Amino acid sequence: MYDDGYTGGGGSPGGVSMSARARLEIVKGAARQTIGISAGKPATIGRSKGASLQILSGPVSRLHCQLQFDGKRWLLTDLDSKNGTWIGGQKIRSKAIEHGTIFLLGKRVAIRFQVVEAAKPAPVGRKEQPPEPVDVESCSFCGEPFKAGVKGVPGAEGQLFHPGCLDVSKLLGVEIGGVRIIERVGGTAHVHQLRAHQPSLSRHVLLFAFDEETRAKDGFQDRLLEEVRAVSKLLHPRILQIHDLVEEKDATLVVTEQLPGPSLREILTTKKFVKVPAAMTIASHIVDGLACAEGQGLLVDRLFPDEIFVNADQSAKLDYFRPPVARRMPVSSLCYIAPEVVSGGRLHSGQCRPDAASGEAATKSAIYSMGAITYHMLAGIAPHEGKTEEELLPKILRGVPPSLSRVNLKVSPALARVVERSMHKDPANRPTSFAAFQTDLKKLVSPAL
């Protein structure tokens, strides 16, 4: 389904020495943790108390894998785990990894490897000391850093939490609203995504749980109820279905169907290209769901790969639920936002949905987002890139992405024209609606699909 962009090889590109100091960050499938590792000794990952990085949830063996620096490169080695260690869709035995590599434990727990600093030779006559582990001041539950000058609330085993995260973490293992909460699988410090089991129907479900600070805000409960009612009416196979809204035991939970697979963001992070037939299937599925939402007047003016989830059979679903919570937008997400949203002062709007009066304009902006996401799948790169907001925004407003059919020779000129039209700087030159966008895509769908 996907092309692996990782080429392997020992050490860093250009002959630069690989760092002897690094860190590991759990990004999905288990409680967020970040630890520092160094060349002094191998770092092990597993359920064992003696593991450098202990993970108690997910398909993780007692000693699952280890990382070791061999003087030139970091080697990731599977320790005969039950469910395997995976990189780029391939099960590995031992492989050199580079800065930014994401590897999976049992295809579910995702861990990001990051270089911290280059190793320096010890002065002559002085014994080299292994560097100290990296100290990352972040919440043990959500993984987000604490604000400057703010210390976390201590929990079990010396862990530190945001106050709201500590309260939500206490829900793990608790039965509430007819479901038993198992583990945290994603979200932010204010909106947590939890996996739970519903015994009455013998199925797993996804929960959106809100911290106390969010729940206490004026009007939050009314706005949340309005959003849940609106999205629950979108009975479409390409939109994540909402089952219930539960308010019990000082908790507010939105119950939805379980996510079908990894998010498109995870796929784009771990792979280079999404193959053309699969990318067209994913785009067609999501645009189909958006056309349904558009027909019922439920609008958005931006979309992100984090909200799209892809199953093993290439079927895709959109998480269209937008909780009334202002969320911090990483710089990497800005490239999917339309120029008119950037220039019109709506970039950091805390509104979860646009006003009904801005329906046509919002739809045109959302079409741009969907085009940018499709471009990223096919090109292997985002349409615009930058390390900071100041660097990226001028490119969104005035820059022209590389021609899609030149970046990926497997993309036909006709498909490139459809995607690039959806990303036109002038909204008037984009498709008039998601239904029209879907018509354009269906004309290009390969008979093999």
Image (cartoon, helix red, strand yellow):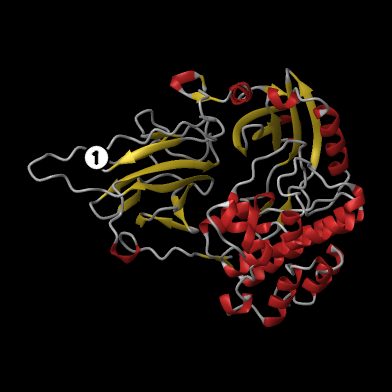
- Quadrant (top left/top right/bottom left/bottom right) for the C terminus: bottom right
Residue 410 higher or lower than 290, as above or below: below
Residue 5 percent across, percent down from the top left? 48, 65
Residue sitting nearer the eye, 411 or 448: 411
| Residue plotted at (59% across, 52% down) | 389
Residue depicted at x 78% and y 23%: 247
Q: Which residue is mark 1?
A: 40
Q: Secondary structure at mark 1?
A: loop
Task: Residue at the far bottom: name it.
Answer: 413
Q: Quadrant of residue 292?
A: bottom right
Q: Position of residue 406 (x, y in %)?
A: 58, 79
- Circle 1: residue type: Gly
Residue 199 visible from this viewpoint: yes
Residue 15 lies, with reference to residue 144, above or below; the image says below
Q: Quadrant of residue 50?
A: top left
Count numbered badges in the picture: 1
**Residue drawn at the location 80% of the way across and 53% of the way down:** 237
- Residues 251 and 331: in front is 331
> Is 124 situated left or right of 81 in this image?
left
Residue 45 position (above or below residue 74): above
Q: Position of residue 53 (x, y in %)?
A: 40, 35
Which residue sits at x=76%, y=68%? 422
The reply to whether residue 198 is in sight is no
Residue 51, horizontal then vertical, whole percent: 36, 33
Q: Nearer the viewer, residue 244 or 38?
A: 38
Is the residue marked by circle 1 packed among few (<14), some (14-19), or many (20+) residues within 10 Å?
A: some
| 380 up-or-down from 83: above or below | below
Judge left or right: residue 87 versus residue 333: left
Looking at the figure, which quarter contains the N terminus? bottom right
Left or right of residue 112: residue 144: right
